[in-house]
Image: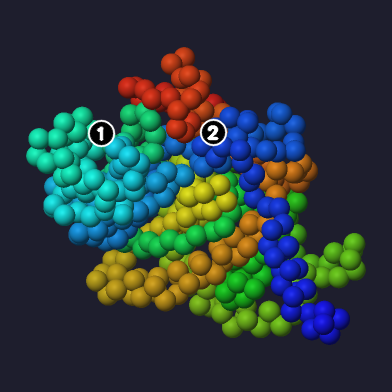
Amino acid sequence: MGSLIRFLEDRVEREIEARKSRGVRVVDPRAQTSSSLLMDVPENDSRRGVPPLGLREYWYPLVPDSKVRGKKPLYWNILGDDVVLFRDKKGQVAALSDTCAHRGTSLSEGDCFYEGFVSCPYHGATFAGDGECVAFICEGPDSKMVGNLHMKVYPTKTIRDWVFIWMGDGEPAPIEEDVPPELFEPETQMHASYTYWTTNWLMAIENHSDSHNAFYVHRNSVSQLTSNHAGRDRSPVAPTGRIINNRSIVTVHPGHGYYDVDGKSPYQMYYPGVDGVWPLHTYRKMWIWFFDIFNARKRAGFTGVFKKAPEEWALGHHLPCAVRAGGGSTRWAIPVEPNLSRIVYFYFTRPKTALGRFWDRVMFKFWRFPMAYNFSGQDNTAATPVRFFTPEHFAPTDSQLIMLRKLITDGSRDAVRRRQPHDNGGGNGASAPSDTAPTREPVGSAS
């Protein structure tokens, strides 16, 4: 029947396509050495030094504070680690390894029978927020496990109703180094949300340096259809940048205006190799004309959000995995699995009145966030099928991407920690346990 009805053949072909190679191929996702990636590229390729599950010696946004509730602990995964979240005796969110130190049971399958503690579902090993066993129910009050059973603890801080977690083995760095300064400004209003992309964390942020995909990947985004200003101008000129404090790359795009005619970049351009123009259809101009006045007002309202920020928090990349974009946006691509990232969005505004704050909340819930999901979701669609293990041939406009990889592999806290004499190269993550904070030595800047 296959000659007439193609159901079976179509299904098989869809399954074959779904299994096509993509993303990062790993031997051991937790290892952060060249052996952790199966790459058909030279030994000196910078990608071999990129940890598939991200940098560990940093603070990350973890979860909205409201998601951790009462009697039931919450399972979460970040950087490949299974974590259980619950509220300690002070009502703060505590984070422990989800693997019970007794027999390896999942603590998140247990309960918070006693306020401020989490109990394992197997033998009732009960832990406080500091990871210490305070009761072992199956052995009674005289159990020798009490005080002798310890869980791995992840330091946490709650800021603006979001829980942040320290994933490193070293002493936590000041959280102010890793999170946007707007979080500490009382006059700013924060809007936050998160989603998931089926791609590796590095590929999810590398596209931010891509200076030429707005008119291509995002051609059908709401932002692009309603504005002639969404994304950067097309240009063969490479972006430049400077590394600041070994934590960020401030981006400059000197190619703006490369194709300008009378001070304005043309919407359609002619490509002689295909004897055609891009974008293909002129009807898009009607949308732009219709929305142009609205967009001019909108841009005027959002351009100044980052003006008060220090230089390292200007537009560009910030370690461990954040990008700072226009419109007051900070977006993290937080590794969950080698080819799955949790995308966290923070938007900041500075409304001056109660009515302005209310209007901001309405706009972000029903306009800005849907637009962000639409626009950046197209980046997910473009980045997901990328084969990260094949040889690359860079364009001149990929210079920012090269700089980002160098910062990660040479200048990050993880890289510095690996170079320290006490590091034996083992352990869970990028570094061996240490009682000292990672050194912050500069690697210089590039432009």
Please state if 144 lies on the left or on the right of 348 as rendered: left
Point out residue 223 in the picture as x, y percentages from the top left corner.
Answer: 57, 71
2 or 1: mark nearer the eye: 1
Q: Quadrant of the C terminus?
A: top right
Residue 333 in sight in this render: no
- Residue 42, numbered label: none
Q: Residue furthest front?
A: 139
Q: Amino acid at mark 1?
A: His
Residue found 55% across the figure and 32% down from its top: 32
Q: Quadrant of the N terminus?
A: bottom right
Crowd class of label 2 (few under 14; some 14 to 19; many from 20; radius 10 Å): many
Residue 171 in sight in this render: yes
The residue identified by callout 1 is 150
Residue 396: quadrant of the picture = top right
The residue identified by callout 2 is 31
Q: Amino acid at mark 2?
A: Ala
Crowd class of label 1 (few under 14; some 14 to 19; many from 20; radius 10 Å): some
Secondary structure of the residue carrying tag 2 is loop
Point out residue 218 in the picture as x, y percentages from the top left corner.
Answer: 64, 67
Residue 379: quadrant of the picture = bottom right
From the viewer's side, name the closer residue of 121 and 318: 121
Please state if 136 lies on the left or on the right of 155 as rendered: left
- Tags 2 and 1 touching, CB below 8 Å: no
From the viewer's side, name the closer residue of 171 and 282: 171
